Each structure stands twice: as C-alpha cells, then as structure tokens.
Image (spheres, rainbow, N blue to C red):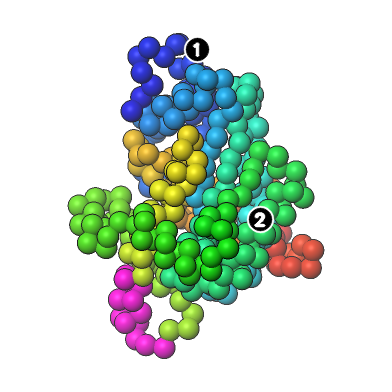
C-alpha cells in the first residue's frame, strides 16, 4: 500500500527521491515498459516508515548464497570479482541514499545458501567459506553500509540439517499450495521455471537420462522455493522493518523490489551463476563462463581466478 494521505509532502518527496535511485537498477522481465515511482506503492510505504521517524533506511537483500557447483559456469566456490563489484555497487547505492536523505541507509545481505544447500548440492563448508569471504570483502573494501546475515546467526549451535528442518517446518508453504500458485500466477511460474533451469544446468553428477534429471530438478525446484519462502519469512521476523530487495525479477506492485547487481543479457544472471567479463571500454558484464573464455583472458586476484578481460 502507498503512504497514507496524511504523510507530509516532504516525506513523500524524500521517499520518491530514494526510490528514484533504485529504478535504474530494477531487475524485471518487463524492461521494455518504462517504470515510474508511482508503480511501487509497497516500496514507498516501506521507505516512509523510516523517513517519518528520521531513522536510517534498512534494506534487506536475500541472495549471495554460494557459487554454482558447476565448473562450466563459475571459477570456483569462493566469491570473485562479480561479488566484489556487486557489493561495491550496493554499498554505493546506500551512500547515494544518504545524499537525498540525511540519516542514510544500510543493507543486510541475507545469504541464503545454507537454507537450501542440500537441495542445490553444495556442501555446507563451501557455503561457510563463501559467506566468510563475502564478509572479508566487505571489510577489505571498507563497505561500511553492508553486513551479512546467514543461517549461522539462527538457532544457535544446531547442525545445519537440523536448522534447515526446523525453519522448513515452521515457515515453508506446502508443495500443494506452491503447485496451485505456479498454475495460477505467471510470476511464480517464471520463478519455478528459472530455478528448474538453474538446477538442471548445475547438476554435475547425475548418471540417469536427461528426462529423469529434468523430473528430479522440477521436484527440487519446489523445495528450493519452499525454503526460499521460509527464509524470507524468517528474515521478516529478524528484520521486521525493512525495504525488501530481491535478486529475482519482480513485477510492479510486488512486496519485493528486484535489483540488478551488474549488467547482463539475462534477467536471471547473478555473480554466483556466471563469470565477469571486463571490456576495453571499462564496462563489466555477467556472461556464461564459456562465452567469457571465448572473448577474454583469465585474470587472477590474490592468486585466485577472478574474472576475464578482453582487449
């Protein structure tokens, strides 16, 4: 819903100015249609809750889970230049909010790798290492507006499998409810198909037929959406007053605002499913690893594969 009519004009103007900073980076499947501030009443209302109180705006972004397990897509299991550039962009976005709204903004990166690590078949130690390197990047780059939150911050010292089971049991929708939603809602269908595609591409150890793999991935896709929804509800409890961002394309009017981290030809591309290509004109783009290898040469950073560079 939009801010109430009683909201002062100054607050409304400030909310619009903050949202204007997000619009150029909106991740959507309807990019051919120009978007205006008024198309996002949910986000205007979320922002207004902070502005009316004069508090720093808090963004939550569910994402940065772990690298794809497919070596055909990524350069390893640790964050690379794609994550560094994305984190730098998000920190700068918060800094620019401070230019139009004095109290500024901060962002919690709610890393969701552990919540569905068993379903995407990435071992928990790899997810730990990925999240630890994200936090180290934030410190090294002095990205003072960012923090990381993950399943290690929830349910104490329980084993990951037990944490996943408890979060799923408390928050996840049923498969039956999701199937009905996929049939009825175009956005949910697109999400289901996108996740199924990723799972099919990322499975590297399947010994059965292609059709059997696709059936299995369709089943796992429902599990990933269940866990993602559960993680979102848990985050809403831990961070009840936030502006909610998503790395998935989001329609106008949705409760979350889809945010594009880097330029990419695919609306679903992320740094953890792609490689980064640095072009001679200084631009950076997320592309499939084979395409990056075809166009550029591999660059190392601190002795690890980082990105590809053309020219």
Q: Looking at the image, is 224 positioned above or below residue 91?
A: below
Write down the region rendered in magenta: 207-219
Secondary structure mostly taken by the magenta-highlighted segment of the chain: helix
Q: Position of residue 202 (x, y in %)?
A: 47, 72
Q: Position of residue 214 (x, y in %)?
A: 33, 75
Identify the image quadrant of the C terminus: bottom right
Front position in the image: 147 or 264: 147
User: Please, which residue is most extreme toward the bottom here?
Assistant: 207
Q: Quadrant of residue 54?
A: top right
Mark nearer the N terminus (2 vs 1): 1
Residue 213 is covered by the magenta coloring: yes
* Label 2–label 1 contact, CB within 8 A: no
Question: Which residue in the protein does label 1 denote?
Answer: 10
Callout 1 crowding tier (Cα within 10 Å): few <14, some 14–19, many ≥20? few
Instruction: Determine the image quadrant of residue 58.
Output: top right
Callout 2 crowding tier (Cα within 10 Å): few <14, some 14–19, many ≥20: many
Helix, strand or loop for disc 1: helix
Q: Which residue is mark 2?
A: 134
**Image point 46% across, 38% down: which residue?**
240
CA separation in Å, label 2 and label 1 = 37 Å
The foreground one among 273 and 1 is 1
Q: Is residue 301 above or below residue 42?
A: below
Secondary element under disc 2, as helix, strand or loop, is helix
Seen at 36% across and 61% down, the residue is 169
Residue 108 located within the stretch drawn in magenta: no
């Amino acid at each position: 819903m939009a801010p109430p009519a009683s909201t002062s004009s100054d607050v409304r103007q400030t909310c619009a100015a903050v949202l204007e900073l997000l619009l150029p980076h909106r991740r959507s499947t309807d990019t051919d249609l120009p978007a205006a501030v008024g198309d996002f009443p949910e986000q205007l209302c979320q922002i207004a809750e902070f502005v009316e109180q004069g508090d720093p705006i808090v963004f939550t972004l569910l994402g940065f889970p772990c690298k794809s397990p497919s070596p055909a897509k990524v350069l390893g299991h640790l964050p690379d230049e794609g994550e560094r550039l994305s984190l730098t962009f998000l920190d700068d976005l918060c800094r620019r909010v401070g230019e139009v709204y004095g109290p500024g903004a901060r962002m919690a990166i709610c890393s969701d790798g552990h919540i569905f690590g068993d379903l995407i078949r990435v071992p928990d130690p790899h997810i730990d290492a990925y999240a630890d390197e994200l936090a180290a990047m934030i410190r090294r780059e002095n990205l003072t507006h960012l923090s990381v939150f993950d399943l290690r911050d929830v349910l104490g010292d329980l084993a990951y499998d037990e944490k996943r089971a408890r979060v799923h049991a408390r928050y996840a929708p049923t498969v039956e409810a999701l199937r009905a939603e996929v049939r009825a809602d175009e956005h949910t269908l697109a999400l289901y198909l996108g996740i199924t595609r990723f799972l099919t591409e990322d499975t590297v150890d399947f010994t059965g037929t292609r059709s059997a793999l696709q059936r299995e991935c369709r089943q796992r896709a429902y599990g990933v959406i269940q866990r993602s929804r559960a993680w979102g509800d848990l985050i809403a409890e831990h961070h009840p007053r936030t502006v909610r961002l998503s790395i998935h394309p989001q329609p106008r009017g949705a409760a979350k605002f889809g945010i594009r981290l880097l330029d990419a030809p695919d609306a679903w591309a992320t740094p953890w499913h792609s490689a980064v290509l640095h072009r001679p004109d200084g631009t950076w783009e997320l592309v499939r690893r084979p395409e990056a290898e075809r166009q550029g040469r591999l660059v190392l950073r601190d002795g690890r594969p980082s990105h590809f560079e053309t020219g």
